[in-house]
Image: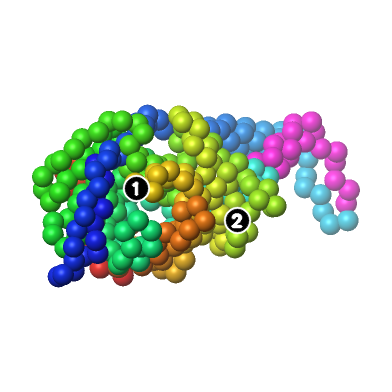
Amino acid sequence: MTAGFGPAGAVGTSSRTGTKPFLSSTTRTFLGVVGAGGGAAVRTQAARHAAQSTAKGRRSGTKAPKLGESRPVATAKGRVAAILAALVLAVGCAPRPLLERAIRARGGPLTSVARQVEADVYLAFPGTWRWRTVYMVPDRYAWTIFTAAEPDHYLFDGTTVRAFIGGREVSADTDPSAPLRSHARFTAVVNLDALRLPGARTAPLPQAELPPGSSAGLAVVLADDGARYRLGFDGRGLLVWAEGTVRLPPLGQGQVVARFSDFRRVAGFLVPFRTSYTFGDERLADERALAVCPADPGVSLESFRTPRLVPDCGAHE
């Protein structure tokens, strides 16, 4: 169920449009760091070869060459040790993939985030609104809209979308096409951490396809339904632009572009405090964050099953 309301206020009026809410189904699989054990083995083997070569030289009475003296020809084992050591050094100095650089530039992995915002909405229900969103990896999502009466809550726990008016549940939906599922997936993509999971494929964008204001970009494809997204990053590695398909009743399904700006450091993370959205070719909304709470300890799976447990994000630093 999706409800639309007029702007909050003492003299506000309300209207409602009923339709189905939102959904997603996700398999959580975590992979270890590929090749970590192999790298350790290479370094151990290189060190062992070097130690054996040194000990052999000592037993044979070979002295270290003095300044001006010629060095003896290296043994085969010594050459192998040098090559292995060079390979280990080269791997350690290789540039990080763009996704990892972006997560690091933000301040590291971000398992959950709560945002309280004020937004100027231009389509469907124009006016100044206030809402709260809560996200937890991989795609748990909650959206609370504050109205002149009771708040409306839309919660997605990974399998079911629930809609509440105040504390009263008014619908529960497991339909994979539920609109809130597209909101949750778009949020998961821009949060970046979910893109490390096996269900997401990423590839660098060619220079000619970079979004406006971006110095690097990623193309993202989600394996379960083939949904495609594009991400743009600035010179610092911060996400500043994102595009993907979102369902927005009563507007329907279309391409949403989000532009992120006004980055501030909160609890060790650089997070945007302003976001502007377009839907197709039209201006959709401009958000101003009132508070951002990264890695909120109050966020848990139960937070997405009842609005009474959805945390209230406090003041930012």
Which of the numbered marks, if any, corresponds to residue 284? Answer: none
Residue 96, horizontal then vertical, whole percent:
59, 48
The residue positioned 16% from the left and 70% from the top of the image is 11
Can the viewer see residue 119 in this picture?
no
Residue 17 magenta-drawn? no
Q: Is residue 210 above or below residue 156?
A: below
Q: Which residues are magenta?
A: 69-88
Task: Point out the residue furthest to the left here.
Answer: 168
Q: Is residue 237 above or below residue 306?
A: below
Q: Is residue 41 above or below residue 195?
A: above
The residue positioned 27% from the left and 31% from the top of the image is 174
Helix, strand or loop under label 1 = loop
Residue 29, horizontal then vertical, whole percent:
40, 30
Residue 292, horizontal then vertical, whole percent:
32, 62
Residue 183, horizontal then vertical, whole percent:
37, 46
The amino acid pointed to by label 1 is: Pro
Residue designated by label 1 = 250
Identify the image quadrant of residue 47: top right
- Towards the viewer: 46 or 99: 99
Using a 10 Å C-alpha cutoff, classify the residue at mark 1 as few (fewer than 14 neighbours), some (14 to 19) or many (20 or more).
Answer: some
Residue designated by label 2 = 211
Helix, strand or loop under label 2 = loop
Asked if residue 258 lies left or right of residue 41, the reply is left
Asked if residue 29 lies left or right of residue 133, the reply is right
The residue positioned 56% from the left and 57% from the top of the image is 233
Residue 86 magenta-drawn? yes
Q: Is residue 165 above or below residue 222?
A: below
